[in-house]
Image (tube, coloured by chain):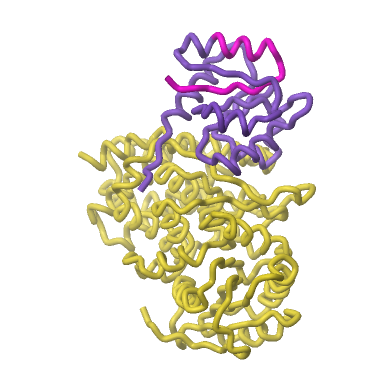
């Protein structure tokens, strides 16, 4: 990783107790709004503290920096950080941020996404205030549409919950808070991988907070997360591999921790009293595309799956593929075992990492299709309960992982 | 022997739960409202709380928040006659919830699970 940071610090800020950071890459069209809202949040709720807004960017060529500095901030100081030209990755932006946070001797850091449309000044309060009250990591709690965040719902949430025993509903939410002490832990961690330097950063940060026993709470945001959602059937790009690869990599590094975890515990919740809950906008799903991708993957990846999955699990996947389309069902217990088998294959280097992670994608599409079919008539709340029940199945299936991991 | 605090304003529920859980070998204590609940927890140090959501003078979900803010490691099982409370996101701060029933099998299973839960300290 490069150690070079490009910095513009026009107000020459050298110390700040509180930082609000906005990571970005080519967000010139959207970054002004979260910048203005964050500035209002700092002025309104943290007026007695020294604060600064930081944009940590990947040297965007679309005018992101100018849009950040041009946003209305009512005098709140701003710093722009960037990776050198050509160096991309959200995680690289965070590495720069952690170094700056340590330099500034900040006690609390709040991060919000640059494409957020629903942020209010209260988000800064809710993500920041617990950090001055004994909590070291604050995850967001917002209502999302049942088909927004399917990687979270089917992998990141159930898997981290079953492994590390903490119920953090949005472990890759993108908007969160962490203490200056935790920034030091992140910076000193030996586990910076290529995936962590990119989209693996969010799950990496949440998991390290858990395995370092940092006090965690979830902050209720009141409004849904409105950003640029994607059809779960669309191309996943590198995000899937980077998030899942990071989860599997962390499993290797924290085996001694997660093997001792039994069941899970809720976290403290902060920030109620925001009035009526607003419902999120719908996310459309193309079920035909999900079915096609699962079937195409079955044909292309079958040989590889047979190497990765245990025989009984492979047989069950075969059965699913041969179900009539209207009866398609990918049971959650099977899905949990598929993920556990992938974790073992990752550990044992059964195939190259990139090939391994790519081969999981069609199975993920199959699981997503099954989830959509089962929940299409459910309200957002009912789907949420459905996901909670799936998480319980992951926890109940964990002995399968423990047994195979040890043998 | 694990100590369980039952907080419910219905006398017959406290009686039923006390009898059954005592038979299961638990040390059971009860409270008929949320008044002084945090002091009670501080003094009696229960291993688990069974908390009614709808009491005449208290909202169990608000009490749950109070408990979580001070004792976030203390398992709490929410107990209610209706499942509409799940629409309130405050309810996720509970370890488990059960719908009130004269068959306590589910409650006993949840108690067992809550008491078995273990997270590494280091």
Q: According to the colouring, which chain is purple?
A: B
Residue A281 visible in this rendered orientation of the protein = no
Q: Quadrant of residue A108?
A: bottom right
Pick the front one: A390 or B85? B85
The verdict on residue B41 being magenta is no
Taking B23 as reference, is A403 above or below it? Answer: below
Determine the residue located farthest toward the front in the rendered image: B43
The x and y percentages for residue A34 are 68, 71
Taking A221 as reference, is B14 above or below it? Answer: above
Q: In which quadrant will I find the N terminus of chain A?
A: bottom left
Taking A14 as reference, is B16 above or below it? Answer: above
Total numbered labels? 0
What residue is rendered at 45% in x and 76% in y?
Answer: A99
Taking A194 as reference, is A335 above or below it? Answer: above
The x and y percentages for residue A285 are 62, 52
Q: According to the colouring, which chain is yellow?
A: A
Q: Quadrant of residue B41?
A: top right
Pick the front one: A124 or A297? A124
Pick the front one: A388 or B72? B72
């Amino acid at each position: 990783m490069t150690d070079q940071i490009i910095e513009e610090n026009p107000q020459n800020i050298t110390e700040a107790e509180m930082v609000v950071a906005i990571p970005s890459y080519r967000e010139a069209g959207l970054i002004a709004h979260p910048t203005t809202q964050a500035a209002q949040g700092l002025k309104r709720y943290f007026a007695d503290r020294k604060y600064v807004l930081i944009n940590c960017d990947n040297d965007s060529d679309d005018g992101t920096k100018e849009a950040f500095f041009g946003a209305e901030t009512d005098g709140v100081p701003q710093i722009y950080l960037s990776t050198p030209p050509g160096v991309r990755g959200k995680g690289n932006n965070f590495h720069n941020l952690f170094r700056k946070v340590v330099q500034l001797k900040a006690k609390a850091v709040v991060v919000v996404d640059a494409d957020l449309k629903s942020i209010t000044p209260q988000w800064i309060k809710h993500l920041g205030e617990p950090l001055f009250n004994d909590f070291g990591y604050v995850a967001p709690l917002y209502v999302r549409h049942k088909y927004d965040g399917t990687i979270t719902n089917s992998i990141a949430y159930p898997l981290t919950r079953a492994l590390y025993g903490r119920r953090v509903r949005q472990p890759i939410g993108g908007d969160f808070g962490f203490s200056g002490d935790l920034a030091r832990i992140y910076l000193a961690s030996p586990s910076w991988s290529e995936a962590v330097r990119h989209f693996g950063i969010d799950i990496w940060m949440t998991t390290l907070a858990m395995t370092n026993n940092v006090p965690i709470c979830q902050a209720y945001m009141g409004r849904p997360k409105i950003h640029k959602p994607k059809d779960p059937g669309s191309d996943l790009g590198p995000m899937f591999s980077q998030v899942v690869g990071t989860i599997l990599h962390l499993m290797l590094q924290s085996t001694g921790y997660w093997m001792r975890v039994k069941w899970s515990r809720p976290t403290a919740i902060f920030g109620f009293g925001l009035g009526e809950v607003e419902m999120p906008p719908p996310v459309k799903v193309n079920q035909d595309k999900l079915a096609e991708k699962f079937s195409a993957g079955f044909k292309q990846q079958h040989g590889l799956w047979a190497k990765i999955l245990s025989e009984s699990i492979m047989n069950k996947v075969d059965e699913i593929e041969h179900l009539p389309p209207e009866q398609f069902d990918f049971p959650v217990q099977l899905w949990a075992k598929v993920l556990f088998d992938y974790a073992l294959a990752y550990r044992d280097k059964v195939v190259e990492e990139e090939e391994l992670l790519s081969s999981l994608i069609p199975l993920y599409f199959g699981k997503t299709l099954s989830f959509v079919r089962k929940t299409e008539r459910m309200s957002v709340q009912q789907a949420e309960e459905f996901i909670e029940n799936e998480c319980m199945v992951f926890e109940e299936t964990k002995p399968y992982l423990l047994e195979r991991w040890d043998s | 022997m694990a100590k369980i605090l039952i907080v419910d304003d219905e006398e017959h529920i406290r009686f039923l739960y006390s009898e059954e859980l005592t038979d299961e070998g638990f040390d059971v204590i009860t409270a008929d409202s949320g008044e002084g609940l945090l002091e009670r927890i501080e003094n009696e140090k229960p291993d688990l709380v069974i908390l009614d959501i709808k009491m005449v003078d208290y909202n169990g979900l608000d009490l749950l928040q109070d408990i979580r803010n001070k004792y976030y490691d203390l398992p709490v099982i929410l107990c209610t006659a209706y499942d509409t409370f799940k629409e309130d996101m405050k309810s996720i701060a509970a370890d488990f919830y059960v719908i009130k029933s004269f068959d306590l099998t589910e409650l006993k299973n949840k108690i067992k699970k809550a008491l078995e839960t273990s997270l590494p300290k280091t």
